[in-house]
Image (cartoon, helix red, strand yellow):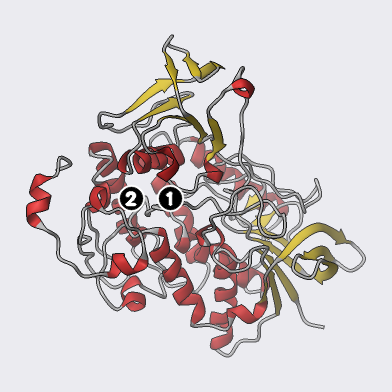
């Protein structure tokens, strides 16, 4: 019998894995038997938007954290696939910061060119994994949610591509149980509309707090207060958005802050991050890490140092996304196919420690960009994934970071040039702060920018 590979998750990471194997097959190479299992009814992972919160159609905890009016918070030129450009997909020039529907369409465009769907079983969730020593295989127990049936499969290699932005980290604050307003985690935020004319409190100071703050401000929230634990978000907020140190406790609708401020809020949104959660993995196989650029215990950030037949994709904190998942998937593929050999256990630990020490030396966001850039270079040099100008992409990330500092409301109106095909992005036909329609149809509409309206806006 030949090798059998199981892939859990058909989001960007799982799809990258399928694409990596197919690219090898197209060149006349034999590939293993592949099966991919996705608990949602469609591929795309996070980008597969749903209006639901809490649980899905079959009672499973929802995976997606996407919401209406979400636009990319980084330049598309930094996440572009090396083998499938935005220009190729849309056959027209678009802006650098597309909305979620446009990015989902792009993700689907590449995978629809392949036969990947035949490998995927949807509405299927992994329940438990055992490593069977006698067989040197993983036994995976699945539930077919649609049929309400349980079954098992055996795999020589298991690739976990479930992501790590779907299980909320929900902290407790004294008095929150008696708070009389609305309380939710960012995972359940589905758009700014319910918060129009409200005073809202966001607890947390990472990307979700930053983006939900400006989305709500844009769509008519009365005021936004962001409560940070250690450091405030490094940007200039418009009037209507402010930052305060951490909440100490609640009384009725009032929040009390460390600096003595007391304010009343209509709603509280916990932007407090996510847990790396793998309930289907036993303790001895489970990846246990915080959100960082190089999780401990994984060779090249992909292969478990506990069991070399267990691989993880996309488990890092991310500047790069789609093309990093590709680099990891191509590396994983070549390793599974025997084209990359593992060094000794000592050399593996030395390599892991080197990367972890390099990350510990990072101080600024620019340092983190450079770290992840070097990590991707390291992976691509080991495979035939098309090398691209990663130094140029790193420069774009650094410009993006400065653009956000200068004006959090207008950075999405900036444009960049693709390193893949040198296409220069066009300004979107409507300034981001004035664009209230995030549909694919509206985005691709070629209505010209109204220069008179631009002159009237207060955001330039």
Front-lying residue, 454 or 95: 454
Q: How many marks?
A: 2
Across and down, in percent, residue 225 comes to: 39, 27
Please report the residue visible at 57 percent of the width from the left and 48 percent of the height from the top: 165
- Please identify the quarter of the rendering in which residue 406 is found: top left
Q: Secondary structure at mark 2?
A: helix
At 64% from the left and 69% from the top, the residue drawn is 335
| Neighbour tally class for label 2: few under 14, some 14-19, many 20 plus, Cα within 10 Å | many
Estimate how packed mark 1 is, as few (under 14), some (14 to 19) or many (20 or more) residues with alpha carbons within 10 Å. some
Q: Secondary structure at mark 1?
A: loop
Residue 421, how many percent across, how many down? 29, 73
Marks 2 and 1: in contact by CB < 8 Å?
yes
Which quadrant of the view contains residue 424? bottom left
Q: Which of these two is toward me, 27 or 261?
A: 261
Q: To which residue does mark 1 refer?
A: 319
Find disc 2 in the rendering and name its residue: 397
**Whether residue 217 is situated above or below residue 6 in the rendered picture:** above
Residue at the image position 54 percent from the left and 88 percent from the top: 27
Give how far across and how far down residue 166 sits, in percent: 60, 49
Q: Answer above or below: position of 262 versus 162.
A: above
297 vs 266, left or right, is: right
């Amino acid at each position: 019998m030949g090798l059998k590979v199981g892939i859990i998750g058909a989001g960007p990471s799982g799809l990258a894995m399928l694409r990596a194997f197919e690219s090898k097959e197209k060149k006349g190479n034999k590939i293993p038997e592949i099966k991919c299992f996705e608990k949602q009814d469609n591929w795309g992972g996070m980008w597969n938007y749903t209006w639901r919160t809490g649980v899905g159609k079959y009672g499973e905890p929802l995976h997606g954290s996407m919401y209406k009016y979400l636009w990319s918070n980084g330049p598309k030129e930094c996440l572009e696939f090396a083998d499938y450009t935005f220009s190729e997909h849309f056959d027209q020039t678009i802006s650098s910061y597309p909305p979620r529907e446009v990015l989902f369409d792009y993700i689907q465009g590449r995978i629809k060119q392949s036969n990947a769907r035949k490998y995927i079983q949807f509405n299927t969730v992994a329940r438990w994994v055992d490593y069977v020593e006698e067989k040197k295989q993983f036994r995976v127990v699945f539930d077919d949610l649609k049929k309400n049936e349980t079954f098992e499969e055996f795999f020589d290699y298991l690739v976990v591509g479930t992501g790590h932005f779907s299980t909320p980290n929900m902290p407790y604050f004294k008095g929150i149980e008696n708070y009389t307003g609305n309380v939710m985690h960012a995972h359940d935020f589905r758009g700014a509309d319910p918060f129009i004319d409200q005073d809202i409190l966001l607890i947390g100071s990472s990307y979700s707090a930053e983006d939900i703050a400006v989305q709500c401000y844009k769509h008519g929230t009365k005021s936004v207060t962001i409560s940070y634990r250690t450091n405030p978000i490094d940007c200039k907020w418009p009037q209507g958005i402010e930052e305060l140190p951490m909440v100490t406790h609640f009384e009725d609708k009032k929040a009390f802050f460390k600096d003595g401020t007391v304010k009343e809020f209509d709603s509280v949104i916990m932007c407090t991050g996510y847990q790396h959660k793998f309930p289907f993995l036993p303790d001895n196989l489970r990846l246990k890490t915080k959100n960082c650029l190089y999780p401990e215990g994984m060779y090249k950030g992909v292969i478990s140092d506990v069991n070399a037949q267990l691989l993880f994709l996309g488990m890092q904190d991310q500047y790069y996304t789609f093309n990093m998942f590709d680099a990891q998937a191509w590396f994983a593929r070549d390793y599974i196919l025997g084209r990359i050999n593992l060094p000794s256990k000592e050399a593996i630990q030395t390599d892991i420690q080197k990367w972890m020490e390099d990350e510990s030396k990072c101080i600024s966001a620019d340092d983190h960009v450079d770290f992840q850039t070097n990590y991707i270079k390291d992976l691509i040099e080991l495979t035939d994934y098309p090398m691209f100008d990663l130094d140029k992409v790193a420069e774009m990330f650094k410009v993006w970071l400065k653009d956000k500092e200068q004006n959090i409301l207008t950075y999405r109106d900036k444009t960049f040039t693709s390193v893949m095909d040198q296409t220069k992005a066009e300004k979107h036909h409507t300034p981001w702060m004035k664009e209230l329609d995030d549909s694919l149809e509206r985005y691709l509409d070629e209505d010209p920018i109204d220069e008179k309206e631009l002159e009237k806006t207060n955001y330039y």
